[in-house]
Image (spheres, grey):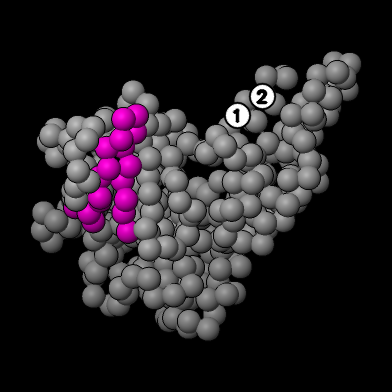
Amino acid sequence: MPGGDPGARLLTPRGRGGVAIVDLSGPARWDLAARLLGRDAIAGLRVGTPPRLLGLHLAGGIADRALVVVRPASIELHVTGSPALVAEMERALGGFAPDPALAPAERLLREAIGTAQLALALEQRGLDFAAHLEWLRSLPPPRRQVEAAATRERSVAALALAWPVRLVLCGARNAGKSTLFNRLAGGERVLAGPTPGLTRDPVAEPVELGGYPYLLVDTAGEGEPADALEAEAIVRARELGRAALRILVVDGCVGPGPHDAELRATATLVVRNKVDLPQAPWPPELGEPLPLSCADPAQAFALRARIGMELRLRRGLRAAGPAGGPAALDPAQWAALAALA
């Protein structure tokens, strides 16, 4: 569910495009701009300053450049329309506020990346959530409690379907995280191979798994860093894993390493990778992992379905699709529903 500063909004539709525009408005707009561009870089900007290209700083380094347009009440950042880049900006800002001009169902209809999201959006588009809340308020307390509980149950699944959560792949170097990332993303999105340390900078990609949306993130592997850059990459990977769902990827040929027991404590799912090769012993204290192999690209569809199902069950969600009645689709609707309790 989004929790971003109300001054940060995405003006262009989500998904691949030539240009993405992020609008920063309100009293905090200069502080928000400083998060992305650096305070020194924006020091000379004023209303009336010609549009200027400035470095966009994400995940500790310059990720791209932004065309900065300063308006009387807002700052617009025009950037490359890469979903991964926009996702990193969204993370740095703490999230994007919904467009106040769009109803929640209309927003979902525009931003849907899968058929389950479309089905939910079309269902809720034909329902009046505000009228449903008024109906709930009119009920006698005992019945209101029952009906509100049913609406909350529908809303938990609806919100999970309407708003992607970050899903971070973590584990030791050369465990197969990048290959798994490519299979789940549906293409060769990142470099993958037997050489340890190929992934340093985090890479993010919107994906649909089991009908639910995720922002999938590939990160640097755990282990003794070879240099300062790799040490910094490991720190960034750990930071990204906080407040996110995590898949711990373990090389089944080698078995769990010294960092895996710690990562297991907060992992949503543990994967025992490379099961098509001879396997090392698996310690029972780490629990039963999900065995899989990412070697064959032809198995990518089945792999996505399997991991999507496992994640859905671990999150306690029902099958993705229509809610079966009025449901909250954004934080404001959820707060109004919660107030009935």
Tell me if residue 212 comes above or below residue 137 in the rendering.
below
Coordinates of residue 279 in the picture (x, y in percent): 43, 75
- SS class of the residue under badge 1? helix
Where 99 sits versus 295, above or below? above
| Mark 2 Cα shell of 10 Å, populated few (<14), some (14-19), many (≥20) | few
User: How many callouts does the rendering have?
Assistant: 2
The residue beneath circle 2 is: 336
Q: Are marks 1 and 2 in contact (CB under 8 Å)?
A: yes
In the visual, does 41 lie left or right of 4? left
**Magenta region, residue range:** 62-80
Q: Amino acid at mark 2?
A: Ala
Residue 76, horizontal then vertical, whole percent? 33, 42
The residue under the point 81% across, 19% down is 137
Residue 57 appearing in the image:
no
Per the image, the residue denoted by label 1 is 332
The amino acid at mark 1 is Ala
